[in-house]
Image: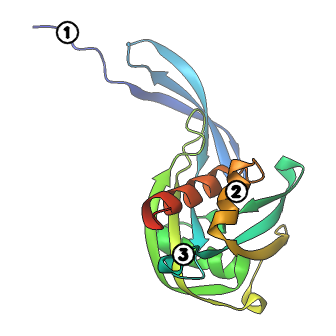
């Protein structure tokens, strides 16, 4: 009988920090070659992000909503799609619906799942579920932003958004993934 290497994975974990958004663990891990080591791992509840589509794909160049939001970590405001953390056992589509309303004041008739991404898998277990929202009714007065959310809502043509990505003016990973996935696989651009 040939010895099979032990299965890779977590052997032990030690919690170092618990915060409002993330926790930090030091995990003892077995790697695929059988060796072991320690990994710092940020734990995150997960999130949803949504590309609000204002006009139909057959309109030629769909109109979408983006937000320009102040982000302390970037040193200023950046273009993003509405997004936020899952609350407890909240379903990703419910989170997308809630975040769309809170950040833009919009509601949607339909949410289409695009994909799920790991934005920083080298040290964080966060998964972001990406959606496109259709059949929008926008009333910014319904927005219910949190105290640290400074948001400007901007409708723009998808072609302009793609240009902003190409030119490096949109640098937010979840937004880039959401827009490019939608443009490539849904809008057929």
Look at the picture and state if 76 lies above or below 132. above
Q: Nearer the viewer, mark 1 or mark 3?
A: 3
Between 158 and 114, the residue placed more toward the observer is: 158
In what element is the residue under mark 3?
Answer: loop
Q: Quadrant of residue 49?
A: bottom right
Residue contact between numbered discs 1 and 3, judged by CB atoms under 8 Å: no
Q: Is residue 101 left or right of residue 130?
A: right
Badge 1 local density, few (<14 within 10 Å), some, or many (20+)?
A: few
User: How far across and how far down the image is residue 66, in percent?
Assistant: 71, 70
Q: Residue at x 49, y 76 (%)?
A: 57
Residue contact between numbered discs 3 and 2, judged by CB atoms under 8 Å: no
**Label whose residue precedes the other's in the sequence (3 or 2):** 3
- In this view, the residue farthest toward the left is 1
Spatial CA distance of label 3 from label 2 is 16 Å
Q: Label 3: which residue?
A: 60
Residue 83 visible in this rendered orientation of the protein: yes
Spatial CA distance of label 1 from label 2 is 54 Å
Q: Label 2: which residue?
A: 163
In what element is the residue under mark 2?
Answer: helix
Q: Nearer the viewer, mark 1 or mark 2?
A: 2
User: How far across and how far down the image is residue 64, in percent?
Assistant: 64, 74
Spatial CA distance of label 1 from label 3 is 60 Å
Between 71 and 169, the residue placed more toward the observer is: 169
Look at the picture and state if 126 lies above or below 157. above
Between 156 and 85, the residue placed more toward the observer is: 156
Q: Is residue 15 left or right of residue 170?
A: left
Q: Label 1: which residue?
A: 3
Residue contact between numbered discs 1 and 2, judged by CB atoms under 8 Å: no
In what element is the residue under mark 1?
Answer: loop
């Amino acid at each position: 009988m040939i010895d099979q290497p032990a299965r890779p994975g977590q052997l032990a974990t030690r919690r170092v920090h618990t915060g409002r958004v993330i926790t930090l663990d030091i995990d003892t891990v077995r790697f695929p070659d059988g060796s072991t080591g320690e990994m710092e791992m940020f734990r995150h509840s997960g999130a949803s992000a949504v590309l609000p589509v204002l006009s139909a794909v057959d309109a030629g160049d769909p109109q979408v909503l983006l937000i320009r939001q102040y982000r302390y970590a970037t040193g200023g405001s950046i273009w993003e799609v509405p997004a936020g953390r899952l609350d407890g056992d909240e379903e990703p589509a419910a989170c997308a619906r809630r975040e769309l309303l809170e950040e833009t004041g919009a509601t949607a008739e339909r949410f289409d799942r695009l994909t799920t991404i790991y934005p920083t898998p080298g040290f964080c277990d966060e998964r972001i579920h990406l959606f496109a929202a259709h059949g929008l009714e926008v009333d910014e007065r319904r927005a219910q932003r949190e105290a640290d959310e400074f948001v400007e809502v901007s409708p723009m043509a998808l072609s302009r958004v793609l240009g902003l990505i190409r030119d490096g003016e949109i640098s937010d990973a979840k937004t880039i993934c959401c827009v490019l996935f939608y443009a490539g696989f849904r809008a057929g651009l």
